[in-house]
Image (cartoon, helix red, strand yellow):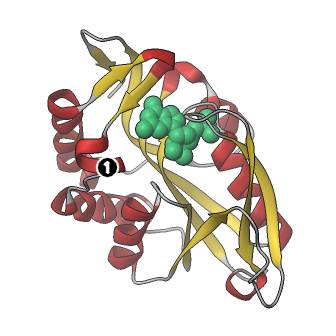
Amino acid sequence: MNMNGAKNCVDLLKDKINRCGKVLGGNVLKVDGFLNHCVDIPLMAEIGRAFAKIFENEDINKIITLESSGIAPAAFSAMAMGVPMIFAKKGVASNMSEGAYSSRAMSYTHGGMYDIFISREYLCGSDRALIVDDFLANGSALRGLIGICDQAGARVAGCGIVIEKKFQGGGDSLRSEGYRIESLAQILSMDEHSIVYAN
Ligand code: 5GP
């Protein structure tokens, strides 16, 4: 893992989480103040550069994410790497002219399953994709996106996560299956009084 170039970004991110994050019930970390609602653009630019550095040897040609909260870090990663970003849409794919790859994921914050789609026009067998998302908890969102890449025959070169809640196990389960998962802030435990990081 090449986290050297990301050290500054990790410190900025953890500082921001400590100052603005709020731990809610159900192991939800609310970060609306800089990531999920109001977006800290200079921090997103740092995050994009960090992922570009971490995955610089992976020959990535597309960034894949899930609407809506993955779009900000994914867009800045795409900018830093000079590649397109495609976000999977939630809901009905009726207006996708060439048909779509689809998968299902469990919503961590809202509960229940939902369908996600990427048009066949934008992902193909020669692609090497980097999946970027805001959070990694149980791994359902990543598995949904990996499923879409598999349908397209695209290779998943890695997954870049802004905040991984390691105690929920989704990341380590995917790592044990051989996926390269790199997360910037790695949370070991959290409650309303403190957040403990692994890094
Ligand atoms: P997973 O599918 O890994 O269980 O959860 C990841 C997805 O759920 C992310 O795309 C993210 O949108 C959402 N999520 C999971 N945990 C949290 C959290 O603690 N806070 C917020 N804001 N979103 C979360």
At numbered mark 1, what does the secondary structure look like: helix, strand or loop?
helix
Residue 143 higher or lower than 186, as above or below: below
Q: Which residue is at 75% across, 84% downward?
A: 96
Looking at the rendered structure, the number of numbered marks drawn on it comes to 1
Cβ of disc 1 within 8 Å of ligand 1?
yes
**Where's the C terminus, which quadrant?**
top left
Amino acid found under the numbered disc labelled 1: Leu
Considering only vertical position in the picture, is 55 above or below 196?
below
Q: On the image, numbered disc 1 is attached to which residue? A: 35
User: Is residue 70 left or right of 64 when viewed as pictured?
Assistant: left
Q: Quadrant of residue 145?
A: bottom right
Determine whether 172 is above or below 161 in the image. above
Q: Is residue 193 left or right of residue 197?
A: left
Q: Is residue 12 visible?
A: yes
Report the front residue among 52 and 123.
Answer: 123
Q: Position of residue 190 (x, y in %)?
A: 37, 15
Q: Residue at x 38, y 68 (%)?
A: 77
Q: Is residue 184 left or right of residue 58?
A: left
Residue at figure coordinates x 33%, y 75% from the top left: 80
Badge 1 crowding class, 10 Å Cα cut-off, few under 14, some 14 to 19, many 20 or more, is: many
Q: Whole-percent x and y of residue 105? A: 73, 46
- Where 112 falls versus 159 (above or below)? above
